[in-house]
Image (tube, rainbow, N blue to C red):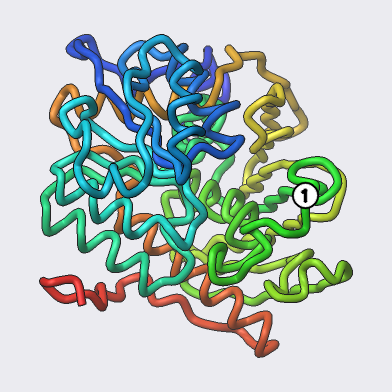
Amino acid sequence: MSSTPTDVVEDFTRRDWQGDDVAGTVRVAMIGLGWWTRDEAIPAVEASEFCETTVVVSSSKEKAEGATALADSITHGLTYDEFHEGVAADAYDAVYVVTPNGLHLPYVETAAELGKAVLCEKPLEASVERAEKLVAACDRADVPLMVAYRMQTEPAVRRARELVEAGVIGDPVFVHGHMSQRLLDEVVPDPDQWRLDPELSGGATVMDIGLYPLNTARFVLDADPVRVRATARVDDEAFAAVGDEHVSFGVDFDDGTLAVCTASQSAYQSSHLRVTGTEGELEIEPAFYNRQKRGFRLSWGDQSADYDFEQVNQMTEEFDYFASRLLTGTDPAPDGQHALVDMRAMDAIYAAAERGTDVAVDVDAGTDADADGT
């Protein structure tokens, strides 16, 4: 083992990514005014150091103008059509796209045409093909694109990555990741919602919450998936069209690590990420829910220790990281190419569940969109 736990786990650095040269404010337009934007994103930006919400965009003019009261900094409430027309484009520097998955593409394309930086919610889109077009649009316009994997700015997850990289648990062998919730009972109690529409969501469970253990494992290991296998089950008729209510999937990573991940939209709210190595183990539990206090345990030899650290609002960290990169002229990460790997992996997971066989993940595939986006 190249480092001892006491050498590495002295404290949790909240913002190891933040330098001393960050100054200024990034003005953000929120595209989509669902509960996540209103209850999580706008308050998170209000608490941030480097950004503010100045524009909100919705399908309804009345709803958009009403939402200007959600923060003192909001000066414009626009319809989607007004956004596409470029109304009030001088009032914001970047957009946060948080519409249903299958509607990300047109808003990112417009933002790119307007020369605005993009923070796009995950997953990138409802299909690999549309995700590739989204990335190509930002590449053509040469605008920064960051994908909102908030776990990658979470201090506990960043420390886990450091520990793995430092060799504290030896060579990683297994990852176990899990995320579950009761979508229709506790989160959005309405079966007529976009997450259950395959055209808008791309899938109910893997695309929504299965993505958390998948991408967080990638980040902690600094590795990419090369092969997957999966099983999906539907118990509630509301999930019939999307085909995945409860899911388990295995992932082979290119560093040799094996992962087993589970996710459910109809099970007790729970989340964890555990990485087992040849000489130790680390665990984050709870792991993925923004408003839950995250725990961190490190085990090595015959010893085990729980570590306390500053609990943060994951959304505030994500927005400030994004803004800091724009203010310092630094490319933000994770970018579109990183997110395309997840899109291809999730596509393979769905294929594996349908076929009952292992499916290879082509992480090096190029985009299908040509220079004019067709």
The number of numbered badges drawn on the structure is 1
Residue drawn at x 47%, y 62% is 102
Residue sticking out furthest to the front: 62
Residue found at x 63% / y 60%: 259
Q: Is residue 89 above or below residue 338?
A: above
Instruction: Tell me where residue 137 appears, x and y as whole percent.
Output: 20, 59
Residue at 63% of width from left, 43% of height from top? Answer: 279
Element under disc 1: helix
- Nearest the viewer among 21 and 71 is 71
Quadrant hosting residue 15? top left
Where's residue 5, x and y in %? 57, 24
Which of 347 and 125 lies nearest the eye of the viewer?
A: 125
Q: Is residue 362 visible?
A: yes
x%, y% of residue 60?
47, 41
- Visible in this render: residue 166? no
Residue position for label 1: 183
Q: Residue at x 41, y 71 (%)?
A: 128
Residues packed near mark 1 inside 10 Å, few (<14), some (14 to 19) or many (20 plus)? many
Using residue 101 as the reference point, say whether residue 136 is left or right of it.
left
Q: Nearer the viewer, residue 276 or 188?
A: 188
Give left or right: position of 175 versus 45.
right
Quadrant where the C terminus is found in the figure: bottom left
The reply, left or right, for residue 116 in relation to residue 56 is left
Corner quadrant of residue 156? top right
Disc 1 marks a residue whose amino acid type is Leu
Residue 231 lies, in percent from the top left, at 74, 75
Residue 15 position (above or below residue 164): above
